[in-house]
Image: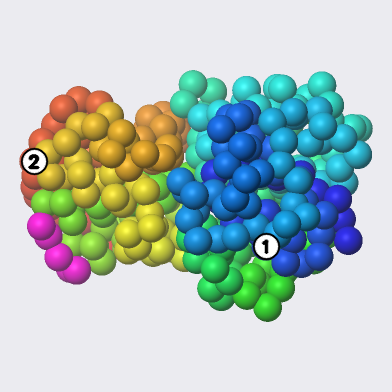
C-alpha cells in the first residue's frame, strides 16, 4: 500500500482517487477550492463534475496543500493544464527531495510552450515525473469501464512503479520511455478534437470526422517527430487512441466546445457553456508556434486557430481545408 495525494479534485483527479483507493492505497485528495472539499467531505462525491461516483468513507479531503503532501510517497498532479505552473510552484515548498510526481493533465503552456512535465521539473527541483495519459474519460474510469493507458518516463523503474500502482482488472497500464511524445500527442489531439466538434456543429457527417481524425494524426505525428518524439508513440494509445476517443465521444469537453463553436458560439461562450477547462483552446496557439519553429505544415491546426482567435467562420475554414492544393496522402 502507498500513501498518495491527488492534487486536484476535478473529474479526472476524482476518478483516479477512486481507482487508487480500489487498489488498496491510502488516498488524500486536495483542492484549492474550499467548496469542492466541503462537498467531497459531506457527500464523498464530486457532484458537479463526476456525479454518481462514490468515494470510500476512509478517503481524506483537504484544502491545506502542506497537509495533503506531508509524508506522501507519490503525488498525482491532476489540475487543468493552465494551472499546472502555479500549482507546482506552490507545491515546491513542501515536496521532498526526489519526490515522485505523476502528471495526468494534458496541455502545452501558452507562453513558454513547455509540456506539463517540463513545467513540473522547472518548478519542483529534483522531482521525478511520470506522465500518465491515454484514451481515458473520467466518467468511464470512475465507473470501472475497461480502459488502457500509458505511464511514460525516461526512468524505466519509475514507469514500472506507476504501472504497478495504477493497474487493476479494469485499468490496464502500459509503459513508455517517450514521455515527451506522449505529452505532445495528448495536448495536440485536443486541437484536432475541436475541429471534429466544429464539423459536427456544422452538421457534417462520419466521412468528415474520419478525414479529420486521419489527417489530424498525420499532423500530430509530423510535429511530434520533428520535436523529438518517437513515431510509434503517435501510432499508439497516446496518439491515435487518444485522438479517436476525444473526437468521437460526447464525454470530450473539446468536442463539445467545438460543436458549440460550429453552431455559431465564440470560443469564450463555448467554454462557459461546457463549464470545464477546454484544453484545446490553450494548446492551439502553442501548436502553431511549434509548427512554425520546426517548419511543419499543420493546416487543420492553423484553421482551428483562425476560427478561435481571428473570428474566421467555421464553414469557411472547412472549405479552405477542402480546397487546398493537391497533395499525395503520404
Q: Pointer 1: residues within 10 angstroms few (<14), some, or many (20+)?
A: many
Q: Is residue 154 visible?
A: no
Q: How far across and how far down the image is residue 37, in percent? A: 63, 37
Q: How far across and how far down the image is residue 277, in percent? A: 42, 37
Q: Which mark is residue 316?
A: 2
Q: How far across and how far down the image is residue 112, in percent? A: 54, 23
* Image quadrant occupied by the C terminus: bottom left
Instruction: Determine whether label 2 and label 1 are within 8 Å by CB.
Output: no
Q: CA distance from mark 2 to mark 1?
A: 44 Å
66 relative position to 243: left or right: right
Q: Earlier in the sequence, mark 2 or mark 1?
A: 1
- Which secondary structure, mark 2? helix
Front position in the image: 5 or 112: 5
Segment tinted magenta in the rendering:
203-207
Instruction: Indicate whether 21 appears above or below 75.
Output: below
Q: Is residue 206 magenta?
A: yes
Q: Residue at x 11, y 51 (%)?
A: 202
Check disc 1 and report the residue beneath it.
19
Q: Nearer the viewer, mark 2 or mark 1?
A: 1
* Image quadrant occupied by the N terminus: bottom right
Q: Give the farthest residue toward the front.
A: 42
Q: Residue at x 85, y 38 (%)?
A: 99
Q: Which mark is residue 303?
A: none
Amino acid at each position: 500500500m502507498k500513501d498518495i495525494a491527488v492534487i486536484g479534485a476535478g473529474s479526472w483527479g476524482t476518478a483516479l482517487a477512486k481507482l487508487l483507493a480500489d487498489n488498496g492505497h491510502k488516498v488524500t485528495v486536495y483542492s484549492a477550492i474550499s467548496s469542492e472539499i466541503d462537498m467531497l467531505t459531506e457527500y464523498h462525491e464530486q457532484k458537479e463534475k463526476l456525479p454518481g461516483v462514490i468515494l470510500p468513507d476512509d478517503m481524506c479531503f483537504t484544502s491545506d496543500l502542506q497537509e495533503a503532501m506531508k509524508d506522501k510517497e507519490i503525488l498525482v498532479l491532476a489540475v487543468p493544464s493552465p494551472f499546472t505552473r502555479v500549482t507546482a510552484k506552490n507545491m515546491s515548498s513542501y515536496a521532498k527531495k526526489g519526490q515522485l510526481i505523476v502528471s495526468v493533465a494534458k496541455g502545452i503552456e501558452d507562453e513558454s510552450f513547455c509540456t506539463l512535465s517540463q513545467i513540473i521539473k522547472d518548478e519542483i527541483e529534483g522531482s521525478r515525473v511520470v506522465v500518465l495519459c491515454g484514451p481515458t474519460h473520467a466518467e468511464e474510469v470512475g465507473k470501472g469501464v475497461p480502459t488502457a493507458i500509458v505511464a511514460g518516463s525516461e526512468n524505466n523503474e519509475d514507469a514500472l512503479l506507476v504501472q504497478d500502482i495504477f493497474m487493476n482488472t479494469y485499468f490496464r497500464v502500459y509503459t513508455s520511455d517517450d514521455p515527451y511524445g506522449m505529452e505532445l500527442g495528448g495536448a495536440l489531439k485536443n486541437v484536432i478534437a475541436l475541429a471534429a466538434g466544429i464539423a459536427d456543429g456544422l452538421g457534417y457527417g462520419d466521412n468528415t470526422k474520419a478525414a479529420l481524425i486521419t489527417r489530424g494524426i498525420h499532423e500530430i505525428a509530423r510535429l511530434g517527430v520533428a520535436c523529438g518524439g518517437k513515431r510509434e508513440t503517435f501510432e499508439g494509445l497516446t496518439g491515435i487512441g487518444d485522438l479517436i476517443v476525444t473526437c468521437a465521444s460526447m464525454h470530450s469537453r473539446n468536442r463539445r466546445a467545438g460543436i458549440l463553436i460550429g453552431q455559431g458560439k465564440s470560443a469564450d461562450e463555448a467554454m462557459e457553456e461546457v463549464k470545464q477547462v477546454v484544453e484545446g483552446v490553450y494548446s492551439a496557439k502553442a501548436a502553431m508556434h511549434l509548427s512554425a519553429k520546426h517548419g511543419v505544415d499543420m493546416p487543420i491546426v492553423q484553421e482551428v486557430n483562425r476560427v478561435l482567435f481571428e473570428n474566421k467562420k467555421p464553414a469557411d475554414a472547412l472549405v479552405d481545408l477542402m480546397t487546398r492544393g493537391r497533395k499525395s496522402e503520404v
